Amino acid sequence: MEAYHLNGDYDRLHFTNYENRSDEEELEEIISILKGAGCIVSEPIIAPDCDYFKCSIGCIPFTIIYSLDPNHGTFICCFDKNGMKQLEELFKKQEGK
């Protein structure tokens, strides 16, 4: 899985699904990586078109958005530049594994 920003939108971190896994498996891996790094991940909040998880890395809040539309996957939204940098680094470490 590779993390990237789409069209210069640096508040959202998207993921490339090279393994062609299901959306559910991708979400599980993202949550596992985040929890393994000590992030706090809430139970999902159910919305009509997505589930979202309120999270934090240290004291910086961010949100995982899981689209309920097939093949739209998951992305992370973080409006704090330092928080986004930490998240980017966290997922870059995972790319090499």
Image (tube, helix red, strand yellow):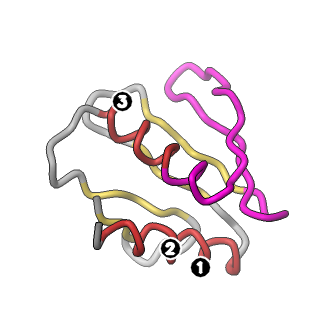
User: In whole angstroms, how far apart are the C-alphas of marks 1 and 3?
Assistant: 25 Å
Instruction: Magenta stretch: give its range.
Output: 33-61
Q: Circle 3 sits in a helix, a strand or a loop, which is it?
A: helix
Res 58 → quadrant: bottom right
**Residue linked to disc 2:** 88
**Residue linked to disc 1:** 85
**Is residue 59 positioned above or below 42 on the image?**
below
Does the magenta-highlighted stretch encompass residue 34? Answer: yes
Q: Circle 1 sits in a helix, a strand or a loop, which is it?
A: helix
* Residue 35 in picture, x, y percent from top left: 60, 48
Res 70 → quadrant: top left
**Residue linked to disc 3:** 24
Q: Which mark is residue 68?
A: none
Most foreground residue, 35 or 43: 35
Quick check: marks 2 and 1 in contact, CB under 8 Å?
A: yes
User: In whole angstroms, how far apart are the C-alphas of marks 2 and 3?
Assistant: 21 Å
What amino acid is labelled 1 in the image?
Lys
Please give the count of numbered marks on the rendered protein. 3
Would you call the spot at circle 2 few (<14 residues within 10 Å), some (14-19), or many (20 or more)?
A: some
What amino acid is labelled 3 in the image?
Glu
Q: Is residue 41 left or right of residue 27?
A: right
Q: Earlier in the sequence, mark 2 or mark 3?
A: 3
Would you call the spot at circle 3 few (<14 residues within 10 Å), some (14-19), or many (20 or more)?
A: some
Does the magenta-highlighted stretch encompass residue 32? Answer: no
Q: Earlier in the sequence, mark 1 or mark 3?
A: 3
Quadrant location, the C terminus: bottom left
Residue at 47 percent across and 63 percent down: it is 13
